[in-house]
Image (spheres, rainbow, N blue to C red):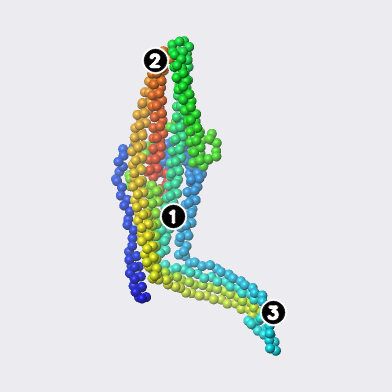
Amino acid sequence: MSFRHLAIFCALAGVAGCASVRPADTRLPAGYEAPAQAAAEVDLAQWWTAFGDPQLTGLIEEALANSPDARSAAARLEEARALRSGALTRFLPQGNLVGTGRKTDSEVTDLETEGEAPPTGVPGFTLGGETETYALNFDVSWEVDLFGRIFAARRAANAELAAARFSYEGARASLAANVADSYFQARGLAIQLEDARRTAAIRRGLLDISARRVEIGIAAGQDADRIAGDLSQAEAQVASLEAELQAQRRTLLVLVGRGIDPIASLPVDASISAPPPVPATLPGELLARRPDVREAEQRMVSATGQVQLANRALFPTINFTPGVGLSKSVQPGLEFSTRNWSIGGNVTVPVLDIPRLLSEIDASGARAEQAVIAYEKAVQTAFSEAESALVRLDADRRGVALLTEGERRAQRAYNASKIGYDAGLQDLQSTLNNEAAWRATRSQLTAAQVQAARRAVQAYKALGGGWPAETIPPGTRAR
């Protein structure tokens, strides 16, 4: 029976040594199906500097240094470093220094003898008194790795640490993008607020003109009432936008780590510039630039290491067990010390555990396949996000150009109608219609400008911007 078990073990061990995880399919198109981007020298690691906005740069740098999100990501990375160290210590010699001490005081309370004196004074055989015993032992157990378990474990642990590093970088990249997105939303609200105030001012001017015309009898009183109603709507819109802008500024303060600072500490200009061009890149660069893709890759490497470690569980485990010890005993009439050392070992061959170990190998293989699929999905998702962001950014740029021209012409039409209404040559309805058309176009232009800036942020992030991909510290690369 033992020979049969040994034969089965050897056969299974040979099969386990040949087990492997399939390589991931990371093929990508040669280029994006998106309009060609203008050549631009942009540092993707710090893409926000390309906007030429010192306030934006300062807010992002402040967030990366002080934000709760950034500090939480750093703490998770430290946890991953500690876990890596702990995962490898089991392959080092294990053992503890153990010291013991005991003191015993005994007293004979009833001793009967048949005419003989009590047996006192014989070393080691006293019937009472104090006894002291001390011992110090150091026993060590060390697994002698002849089958590569430590290499598989190190590969998995290093990959987990690398994945944690990429998760850290991804969190910081997302934080930078979120700050920029919130910043541009705040600027958009500031522009809308200024437009609303401007609309209210226009309505007041029209109300004054209408009131004068009513006084001289060339206009009906209902015209003034209608303009007054429109003015109340404009003033209500101003109040609503003031509240929205204040809430957005508070959100931005929280993002950068200054959540309890007064709102006045974060001024926001009512202007927004055209987004800078996005550098031309190739889809294949996403494999190196996107931190989430590289994290998924390292998760796959870790899962592969776990498969190798599970395979090697079928091989024998050899443990080396040396030890040393000191002891001392003090008794009435006797005191002695001893020193001892020992050396030994044991070999554990899995026999009846083979079915369980094979099940664990199958489970680790299934987890590795999941990691491979997750990596492939991350690659495809990265390509989709990058291409979609580039396509939409191009459409946003064209939309801004068209609306800029439309807003200019709508303003010109309103100015002409206002002059005519003031001179009594234009009716109120036409003037209000032209003002509404100009206001609508202006609102659409503001929304398009904000959307273009936010889309540029999405494009930079989708291309893997926001972290120094070329500087991965030692100890985070898989071995």
At 32% from the left and 55% from the top, the residue drawn is 23
Q: Residue 340, image x and y in percent?
A: 54, 76
Q: Which residue is mark 3?
A: 109
Farthest residue, direction front: 222
Q: Of the two numbered discs 1 and 2 on the same chain, state the one appearing first in sequence.
A: 1
Task: Measuring from the top left, give residue 363's x and y in whole percent.
Answer: 37, 60
Q: Quick one: label 2 or label 3, which is nearer the N terminus?
A: 3
Q: In the visual, does 332 lie left or right of 161? A: right
* Amino acid of disc 1: Leu
Q: Element under label 3?
A: loop
Q: Assess disc 2: are there few (<14), some (14-19) or many (≥20) residues with their C-alpha within 10 Å of its C-alpha.
A: some
Which residue occupies the foreground of this view, 378 or 408?
378
Picture disc at residue 426: 2
- Image coordinates of residue 301 in percent, x first then y, are 38, 56
Q: Is residue 467 above or below residue 477?
A: above
Nearer the observer, 479 or 120: 120
Task: Report helix, strand or loop for mark 1.
Answer: helix
Q: Dividing the picture into quarters, in which one does residue 386 lie?
A: top left
* 231 up-or-down from 453: above or below: above
Q: Amino acid at mark 2?
A: Gln
Q: CA distance from mark 2 to mark 3?
A: 128 Å
Tell me, for residue 27, which label it has, or none: none
- Residue occupying image coordinates x 33% and y 44%: 282
Q: Which residue is mark 1?
A: 161
Q: Name above or below for residue 410 compared with residue 452.
A: above
Q: Residues under labels 1 and 3: Cα distance? A: 68 Å
